[in-house]
Amino acid sequence: MKKVMIKTVNLTKKYGDFTAVKDLNLEVYEGEFFCLLGPNGAGKTTTFLMLLGLTRPTHGSAWIDDCDVIRNPLEARKRVGFVPEVPGLYDDLTAKENLIFTAGLNGIPKGVREKKIKEFLKKVDLEEWADVKVGKFSRGMKQRLAIADALIKEPKVLILDEPTAGIDPKGSEEMLSFLESLSRNESITILMSSHLLHHVEKYGDRIAIMKRGEIIATGSLASLIKEENVIELELESVDEALVSEINALADVREVEKKGNKLIIVAQRDVRKEIFEVASREGRKIIGVRLAPSLERIYVRYFKEEEIR
Amino acid sequence: MRATPIARKELADHLSSRRFPLLVALVLLSGLATSYLGVQSIAQGTIREVEQTIAFLRLLTGGGGSPILSFVYFVGLFGPIVGVALSFDSVNREIASGSMLKLLSNPIHRDSIILGKIVAGLLVILLIVFSSTGIVTGFNILLAGFGPTVEGAFRIVYFAVASFLYISLWFSIGLLFSIIFRRTTTSALASIALWIFLSIFIYLIADVVAAEMAALRSYFPSVPLSAIITYYEIRDAISRISPLTLYMEVANILLNPEIRSTGLFYYYSEALPAPQPLSLDTSIALAWSSFSALIAGFIIILALSTLIFLRTEVRPYWA
């Protein structure tokens, strides 16, 4: 059984009457790539700040690698690297100088500093930029350097707050692939927040969806998909009568018409009933597939919450 | 405590910034200009024939020339700019740029961050004050053709310490504002506003309040002595809220051994017949109340800044 690297129990943060995070219970395992999804104000950053010991929870507990974050934040921060949305590097320093500064803050001995800095700059593909001032870097390069900066203390956990914000798609893919390699090859636990669902879908081992400070769904993409049956049906021709008839089937929640295609969202697999309706109506089926997406799951959770 | 890397970085930032040469130039040019004026006063015989110690020190205080055109007065006036310029954006700029959040995510105590910033700022002030005072003193020796006595040299060193403390007090005010206000422009404006208030308006307020409280009416043909004394006491007490008043008192007492009072007779003590100038120890004892007030103000504001910083929640973009 894999070791729990991040654990929260009823973690709550209130600002006056406003509850930023409410009874958060989370377990993230060693080497796992865990993604936190949610709109602005969902409580993702506050959760990260509590995990870093930078804001005191109103109540609840949190541990990083068995270290109590509330009682011993300094020790916890030795084990966790943080990459904020804004890299927070010093523009007037070179890449190397930025890393030397962070190495100094982490008490890394001078003897091993140089070697480590070289190693991490190489890892993030910035070796040739070591002596260039960070002010001249692109957003993507800064973010890569911020990851190297967080890794210099060799943390067991890496927390990233919207790391791909403002980076071009190619740069984002490269960064996420690198993070994935850290979790797969070096067993570094990754906890990342993102707005970009396709990134989460592609790289996240497990996902938690946050809304108004609460986790409203959590699990692997596969387990979340099980709860959602999205059937993509392609027919020779589609009319409103057919849409109405499928919509009337039990457990069908939504039918969307896209040309000759129907996207059917149901609470269970209703493919058999759909075939029956199509044959009764004399419609020729060209293709059918189960096509759930994280985006649909995400939207569904938010709709359900709004209905509640 | 891992304040050393922070102090080292802050020091490098200060010394390599565009502000630093400007601040040094401001202090130095005002010092050199007043030296020249002071020496001219000696040449024209406006400085009284006194012993060499006093004559040399008068080059710093303005002596027989206008006290407004003295090195002491310029340090009193521009010292706050030096102090505030080194600190008004030291915390809020880092929070706005996101570097503070990154800094805090490392295993360091918050007080190490503030301590690093304070140490670096104070070292820069120390450098500016002592190098400027040294250069101005050297320039005075060159122009006047004579130097201070040993006691005079000590008086100049103590004056430099007082100047350092005075500028440091303003540094701590700038630091406090950089923690309280989220925007650097707001903290800069607040610091300037306080500087103007404590350098100009406080005296007008002190005058009005003292006159009202002492029931002093200038149009009265004869004013009772008790009212005049009360007026001066209240006015001085209110004026001493201003670090400028405290600094000018300390600086003038240290650099002018003929001054024998900080109270009501401060203004006249220089003109009183002096059988002998005060010794350095006596001058220090005389200046001590104002000096200790500067120290207290400096420590209180630094402690307040640290306390507020420790309790400030740092979020990305101040979200």
Image (spheres, coloured by chain):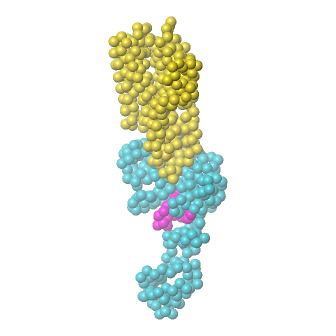
Image coordinates of residue A291 in percent, x first then y, are: 49, 76
In the image, what residue occupies the spot 43% across and 8% down?
Answer: B51
Quarter of the figure that contains the N terminus of chain B:
top right
Q: Is residue B123 visible?
A: no
Question: Where residue A237 sits: x, y (%)?
Answer: 42, 88
Given residues B290 and B25, the one toward you in this image is B290
Which of the pair B200/A67 is nearer the observer? B200
The residue located at (52%, 11%) in the rendering is B279
In this view, the residue farthest toward the front is B221
User: Toward which corner of the image does residue A239 lie, by quadrant?
Assistant: bottom left
Q: In this view, does A257 lie above or below B107?
A: below
- Chain B image colour: yellow
Q: Residue at x 51, y 60 (%)?
A: A40
Q: Which chain is cyan?
A: A
Residue A18 forms part of the magenta stretch: no
> What is the magenta range?
A190-211
Q: Can residue B177 be seen in this view?
A: yes
